[in-house]
Structures are given as structure tokens and as C-alpha cells.
Amino acid sequence: MDNVAKLEIDGKSYSLPIAVGSEKERGIDISTLRQSTGCITLDESYGNTGSCRSNITFIDGEKGILRYRGIPIEVLAEQSSFVETAWLLIYGRLPNRKELKRFSDLLTQNEMLHEDLKFHFEGFPAHAHPMAILSAMINATSCFVPGVLDAYDPAKFELQAARLLSKVRTIAAFAFRKSRGLPIVYPKPAFKYTANFLHMMFSDPYEEYDLKPEVVRALDMIFLLHADHEQNCSTSTVRMIASSQANIFACAAGGVCALWGPLHGGANQAVIEMLEDIHRSGDDGSKFIVAAKDKKSGRKLMGFGHRVYKNYDPRAKIIKEQCDKMLRLLKIDDPLLDIAKKLEEAALHDSYFVERKLYPNVDFYSGIIMRAIGIPLEMFTVIFAIGRMPGWIANYKEVMDQVGGRISRPRQIYMGPTEQPYVQIDQRIKK
């Protein structure tokens, strides 16, 4: 089979090469289409457009496959950690002991924020959303990090990546403490990445947070499972900003802003909001399940099904097991968790949901885990941003390492008025 597609426009035929990926995905290369035909393609929301060639993450939504650098997510969840997975995503292979220790040490060495940044936190109102603070403070932090504004240097990249990945959790924890009127808790070098974040979130100057291994593992799992997910809205945003040669902190801040949108990063928050609505109505979930089957009811199951995965979200099974372990350990009495269990049971066994493949997804379980840990609703998307940071960093590096890369510049089909005269203000029609 020739790797060429034929396109006919106004009776004239054009040959377009077909790019084939390592997993046999096929894409029609239209990079010279406008030059040769005078036409562009129109694909609103880019649902059928490949914006890049990437070596980082592979997804097969029909088969429920997710792999980071070729390694199945199930294997990484069982055998790896968030920090090791971050290195894998960024550098394309698993680190050896020396490389992993060096990267882990860099994270520890760069966990502190410059003391002057405390004044920036003080400038935000108490009700400021943590995502607004996170985006602003990532940019502000770059002003205090040596060499960030220098030209991209592969030899110095590991240090800058470690600085961003380490400081983002400190910023997030400080933002949470500020929103609660609580004193800032500084990181402790003795703690690993995720344990340190929980320490900064929930310890007090007079009493340290009890770091239960199951809780630390559950949050580390959330970070790992969210570390990358192909060319989603925020990752594509990071790549587009990177194409302008902007620095890594600026690109990450842009990614945070894209993730903040409720259609992207707010899915796990929507799960808890749904459970709260059900509880407020006096329902244990039974009535809601019936209503969810009725299209006219307007009730929708949040955290069930997935735009990409047409079968079961491969991350959901992994996080469900961790969720069950943690809930058994904590023995939490929470009516919302009881409702969640009833919804989960219906989705896994009710023929209506099973036939439509409306299975619980990773957002459903991660929302439950974060609530059980005590992470407030407004911090859910921040947790997502911390987890997604390795993927953003990996995609940033991929763009910067590309030889002859060009600035991203989508085209458009103009639908506005044709040429018209300028009308003087006293001659314009009043409306």
C-alpha cells in the first residue's frame, strides 16, 4: 500500500504523504497543502488534527491502552513512583540508580522558595483561587531562579526541570495555607516528594502531619496517573507557547491556565459537587441513578465515561484499588463516600451503564481519594497540575529539542464582513 493520499480539488488531483506512527497510526501530512493548492483544512477544536509527532505518550482509546514511553501505565503504577515516572517522561527511558538519586536530590535541593516570594503571596486576597495563585506564582518564581531567561541549554535543562517540578508543590501548599489563614509550613529535606507535599499542606508548627504510607501512596498514584495524557488542551497549550521559545516556567504557567477550565481540569471537582448535590437533596444515590437514565431529567453522572477511552479508563482500575485500600485504613464516616459507592456499584453492574460503557473513570476515584485525605475542593485542579507537570516538561523539551522547529501558527477560515468603508462617527446609525 502506497503511503500517499489522493485529494481532488476543482478537478485537479494532489498527492499527500501519509505519516505512519510506531503504533501504526496513520495521518495525512498536509504541511504543504496551502502552498500547493491554496486551500487549508478546517477542523474546529482539532479533533482530527495531529499537531505534532511525539515520542512521549501513546493512547488507544478503543482498547483502553495508556503507555508512557512505551511502558504500560499498569506496570508503572505497580512498580514505579511519581518521581521516577517523571524522569521517564522527560528523558525517554527509565533512570538508573545514579540518575534517579541525582534527580531526587535536585528536587530536594530546590524545594524552597525565595523568602521574598512570601510578599507575593500576601498580595492575594484570602478568597483568591489556588489556580490563579499557582499560575501567577510560577511566573513570579521564575524571576528568582538563575538562568531561566537564558537560551535553552540541554546541559542545564535537568536543573531547571527539577526546579519547576519541586517548587510547584511548595507554591501549591503555600497557596492552600494562605487561603486558610494558616502559617506557612516549610518543606523538610528528609521527606520524599509526595510526603513532603502532604507535610507542607497539613502539618502545623506545633504538630506534624501523620504521614500514613497508604495515604502517601494514594496521592503519589494520583500524580503518576495524571503525569501525561497525550495532546490534551493544557499540554497543547504548553507546546504552543514553547514554540515561541518562551522559558519553561512561562510555558508551565500557561498550562495551568488551560487546565483551570472546568471542561479540562475540573472533572474530579465536578464529581464531589455532584455527590454534594445528591446528599443535599436527601437522596442516597438511588433516585439519582434512576434520573441519570432519563435523558429528559438533565441529571448527568460526573466521573463516568471518558472522551478518549471508549471502553474502560485503564487508570480507573488502578486508582480504584488504591482508593479502596485507603478508605479501609482511614475508616472515614462520610455520607458522600457512601453515595459514591452506590453510584459505582450501579455503573459497574447496571445494564444501562454497562451497555453504554459508562464506567467510573480516574476522576471519579481521584476525587474520592482527595476528599478522604482532606484536600479541599478548590485544590483538586491544583493537584492535577502538579501531577501533569512532568508531561508538560517532557513536551516542552521535545519542542525545544526539535531541529528547525517553527512557531505554532494555526490558520483560519474568515467569516466576517468583506471590505467596507470607515464611517465618520457623526454619520453612524444610532442603535
Image (cartoon, helix red, strand yellow):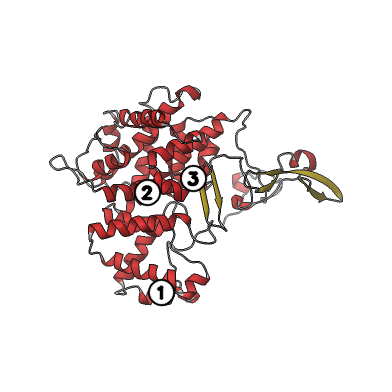
Residue 105 location (% of width, % of height): 33, 29
Observer able to see residue 384: no
Check the image and report above or below for 232 versus 289: above
Q: CA distance from mark 1 to mark 2?
A: 29 Å
Find residue 221 and name its label: 2
In the image, is 381 to the left or to the right of 56? left
Callout 3 secondary element: helix
Please identify the residue farthest to the right as the structure is shown. Answer: 11
Cα distance between the residues tagged 1 and 3 = 32 Å
> In percent of the image, x 48 and y 62: which residue is there?
305
Count neighbours of disc 3 (C-alpha within 10 A) and say few if under 14, some if 14 to 19, many if 20 or more: many
Task: Give the mark, 1 or 3, whose residue is nearer the N terminus.
Answer: 3
Nearer the observer: mark 1 or 2; the answer is: 2
User: Residue 304, how many percent across, how many down?
Assistant: 45, 63
Name the residue beneath numbered marker 3.
Answer: 234
- Give the residue type that dot 2 points to: Met
Seen at 46% across and 32% down, the residue is 248
- Quarter of the rendering containing residue 196: top left
Viewer-side residue, 49 vs 225:
225
Is any atom of residue 403 visible in this view? yes
In the rendered image, residue 154, in percent from the top left (x then y), is placed at: 50, 24
Task: Please tell me whether mark 2 or mark 3 is closer to you in this view.
Answer: 2
- Nearer the N terminus, badge 1 or badge 2? 2
Helix, strand or loop for disc 1:
helix
Which disc, if any, is residue 376? none
Identify residue for label 1.
289
Of the residues shown, which amino acid type is indicated by label 3?
Ser
